[in-house]
Image (tube, coloured by chain):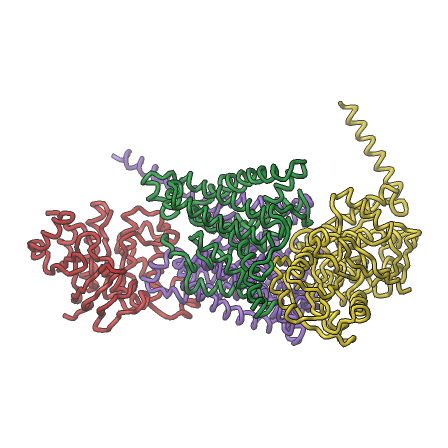
Amino acid sequence: MTAVLEVTNVKKSFGGIKAVDGVSFDVQEGEILGLIGPNGCGKSTLFNCILGQLTPTDGEVKVDGKIVTGLRPSELNRLGVSRTFQLLQVFPKLSVRENLILAGQEHQGNMMSRLFGPSDAGLSAAADQMIGFFKLDHLATEAAGGLSYGQQKLLDAAMAFMGGPRLVLLDEPAGGVNLTMLGDLKERLAAINREKRATFVVIEHNMEFVMSLCTRVMVMAEGKLLAMGTPAEVRANPAVIEAYLGHCGIDP
Amino acid sequence: MRSGIFAGLLLATVSAAAAFAQGAPIKLANVAELSGGGATVGNNWKNGIDLAIEEINTKGGVLGRKLEVTHADSQSNPGVARAQVQKALDNEPYVLLGPGYSGSVKVTSPLAAEAGIAQIMGGEAAELTQGGNKFLFRTSFGQQSSMPKVAKYINDELKAKSVAIVWVNNDFGKGGRDVITKEFAKHNIKVAADISTEAGQADFAADVSKIKAASPDAVFIYLNEEESARMLKELKRQSISVPLMGETTLVGQKVVELAGDAANGARGHVGLTTDAPVDLVKAFREKFLKKYNYVPDHNGLKGYLAIYMIKATTEKMGKVDAKAFADNLHGLTIKAASEPGILMDVTFDEKGDIDRQGFLVEIVDGKQVVKQVLPKLN
Amino acid sequence: MTATGKYLRIALGIAVIAALIIVPMNFNRYGLYILSQWAVMTIAAMGLNLTLGYAGQVSLAQGAFVGIGAYAAAIMTTQGGMPLIAALGVAIVLCFAIGWILGYPALRVQHHYLAFVTLAFSTLAFLVFRNEDWLTKGIYGISNIPRPNVMGFATNRPLPFYYFCLGSLALVSLAMWWLIRSPWGRAFVALRENPVRALSLGIDTRRYTLMAFAIGSALGGVAGTLYAPLTQYIDPVPFNLSLSLDLLMMVIVGGSGFFFGPFLGAMIAVLLPEWLRFTQGYYLMLYAVAVMLLLIYSPTGILGILDRYLAERRTKAASALRAVAKSRLETAP
Amino acid sequence: MSNLLDLLVAGLATGAIYALVAVGFTLLWQTSQTINFAQGEFVMLPAFLMLAVMHAGAPFWLAIILGILLSLLLLGLGFKLLLVDPMLRHGVLPLAIATMALAIGMKEAVKQFFSAEASPFPSIVPAGDVSILGTVVSLQSLGVLALAIAVVIGLTMLLNRTSIGHQMQATAQNPTVARIIGVPVERMILMTFLINAFLVALASLLITPIYLAKFSSGEVLGQAAFIAAIVGGFNQVRGAIAGGLLIGVVDNLAAAYVSTQYRAAVPLILLIVIILFRPQGLLGRPEERTV
């Protein structure tokens, strides 16, 4: 097993506030790492630091052994790291298929081939496959803005998988999704993980979702790493219980 | 009720028949700067035209036919001017009037020449009449005829050896500046400072301080009326006491009104002005003021004269003939004694330039005083 | 989209193109001039529609690029005696390069700040046109700009020149259609809608932003090279800030981000004042009021109205379909 | 040296004019994200309203009062209710375009119903010059400068010392939160439109004797005020004042020491540099509301 992602002592402060305060961990190929912690503990900031949306104040991020700190998000994405956002981020005026083609088009060819090549960048088949995989078939030509919230959430996740990423960082994929949809989503994620050997890091508040999906769980509190282990280990960790009870409580 | 309508119809028929008996109205087309940067120019020009046409029509028209004019707006944009002139020419007018901006004249005059229609315009740039266009006519002195007079005055009377030039950076100002610079060179007058200003500029402090630094023997000011007034105020504030010389736009009544005391001592060459010591011009000014509630600038006069040029030329020909119009206006002298509407005796040469009396005036105690009358050349 | 809808559209398109070719044949010179002007302005507005409508970058400098193109054409064809096609090449390269540079501020600032930077550029360009006499002949302008020979045909007469403008518009439209449908077009839309998400999907937003500026500006230059032989005389005045504002108005009024928006917007800006001329001095006032009323009613422009109408119809149709499906389910045994 | 002093004083006098116009500009932006391209025309119009009242035979003082009231009605209430309110929720750009159309409409209306000519306008400050530090300054310029200072003090007092001012600030900073804590946001936005209308009417009263009442006089003013507002800081009243004064001075220095032909370019280059390196303006704070 090789480490797909290595994070070493990453720090990020805004003014005097240390949002992320020296976090180190690594993620092995094929793993699904859950990242939990109370609101405002620095999870999303950590994501943004890893993905180049923010530049870390200190520390280092490696993908497949290559230092990527300071790269722009688009460059990182083309190296095979993709993500979803906490809030829905699909392109409402484009159709479902167009959204997926868009998500994949920059992963191949160059600017010129994208200008003079076919309009779908040769990705229609790949997009339709993804649509099929996420069971959105009947919606392929619908404008994304017209989909239900849960369907958009699926599309959002599907977009992150176009272009066959090595590593996917999902920020609250289950937030606001209803129960039936939730099962679908979890099952799809697990399937992709199995079939495509994609590696995941998942931020999620829904404990049931995290504990059943993830192979390992990492807990953050106040910008620091609090605990790391299998779901069962983390659940039993007294520090975690303390941290959670002190803030917002945890689903038993 | 029904009989009322019937009577109305009858009346309309009768008057239409009467009009027909007199001949259909003579169609004129005006294209001018009715909006945009040149709106003041264009609207004065238009009002002058309307006033003259109204006068002529109440007295029975030209050769018994009424005059009728359509006004089109060039938006002070040569491209639009071209379109509007094209439209006007498509309707085959008797004569084309306007535009006032030299740039717009330049882009439209080839069209009128191609259509063989005479164009009477307001532009003053020297080059307009020098391209051999046989259909283009001025209503005022071109800069090539006014500026030599100004330069001569500065040399002979003011005995200035170095002069600061202040001009507005548009085709009017730049044209004047270029011609006078050449004239100064002929008289060996040095240009001490060459200062360009913007149309609509409000603050002339920097410009005047540049003049101050150059300490010239005289200042030549070539701006529009409003800017002239502000310039004069600023010159006074920075107590510059050398002679100030200009053109029509420096010594008009409007400048005096706006600049107050500061206008005193300003001198200028004036071709067309409502302040001219000529009874017919004074009468025109009263008529215009009565109709439009303001005193026109020289563009109002130009528009008015354009119509009387048409009247005089047509009456000379004795027929309404658009093709022959330009030929007949070339070399024509119109005397105010026989055609009062022309206000002052005027002669047109083969290029379409005019020859007319001019004045050198000075503002004394808020009044224009004519210092010299520059007679008509021939 | 249904098949009949598609055929209807194609039929409509063919009818419009045929009308644009056939109807003006017996127009007078003025009518042809106005139509040529419409074609030229449409090209400039299409460029701005790419920058603003598709890529979401506000620019108040399109008029300046029309000016650069016009001056390139005027200077090269009158002083250099070169053919218009050479001037076109120079104008495209020049405007592309300057547009690219002007795009850099867009990487730092957005929205109204970007509008002000481009506004400043627009006025600076005007000052250069006016003050650099040695190149542009300053305020006197350049006259006697020749009209080109296209494949052996002289376009001096109004009708051939109109066809030349219309042909250019057709070529530009095809290229634009291609561009919009290509992955680039998709990337531009992504840039407008959500630059952060676009970035996370591997889209190099910087390069696409600069491209949007550069291509849009180059189209301004193309329009300029047609404008110069159209009026046959240019001076700096028409290329001041108000042209940029007019072009912006065309894009917004027509419908920003819609392919046919610039066509309609330019039509309104060029033709509506013509239609209103019978009101004499009031025409510009009425034009202003019309623009305000339109924008109050539909801030997305004329095509925005159509879009809204079609969307409503689709939703209705969809809900009707759902209702039918539902009733079937309920009645099913 | 006296030359430089002269330029500075004259620049400040012109700058004060720009500043007055720029203040209202920033107020509208702050509370309602309105970029008013017609701001210059807003300054042009009140003078004509006053002239119209005077033509009807009213004395100057009555014309001033009626002119200001009409401005409040047309440029404050009317502008907000008829144009801004219906368009505000559709974003900045369509509204900005609509104000461009409004500017055209206003210019044309004045030209059509009044005159294309410049009309002189009576001054409430007596004509004449005074000598300060060896430089001659016109009383009119001093009047404008004094008013500009009075406006800053007045507005600062209103914003910082009164509860209405605090509510307006809250509205400007975050309307959603302001609404939650019980600020009558709508009324506060209306307030700023009325204040803007009042300011442009005052500016019109002071500026028109210098600029003359002319339909096109707003163009130069509007653009200068625009630049002043950005350079100083789009979201600060004192920024707009500082920007106005700075632009006035820079313009004069540029004309004297750089080139009169390119004098207009210098403030624009300053504008570009400021936007690129300090987009919030010299005195502004960084925009808090980002997309």
Foreground of the two, B212 or B275: B212
Foreground of the two, C158 or B350: B350
Foreground of the two, D58 or A71: D58
Q: Quadrant of residue C155?
A: bottom right
The C terminus of chain D - image quarter: bottom left
Locate residue B169 relative to residue D148 in the image: left or right.
right
The N terminus of chain D - image quarter: bottom right
Q: Quadrant of residue C40?
A: bottom right
Q: Colour of chain B?
A: yellow
Q: Colour of chain A?
A: red
Which chain has been coloured purple in this picture?
C
Foreground of the two, B107 or D291: D291
Question: Can residue B231 be seen from the camera position used here?
Answer: yes
Residue that appears at 59% across and 69% down? D259
- In the rendered image, the vertical position of residue D276 relative to residue B315, given as above or below: below
Residue B302: % across, % down: 79, 54
Residue B255: % across, % down: 72, 54
Q: Colour of chain D?
A: green
- In the rendered image, the vertical position of residue B350 relative to residue B43, given as above or below: below
Residue A35: % across, % down: 17, 57
Residue that appears at 60% across and 64% down? B206
Q: State the count of labels.
A: 0
Question: Can residue D215 be seen from the camera position used here?
Answer: no
Residue B78: % across, % down: 68, 60
Residue that appears at 44% across and 68% down? A116
Locate residue A208 relative to residue C313 in the image: left or right.
left
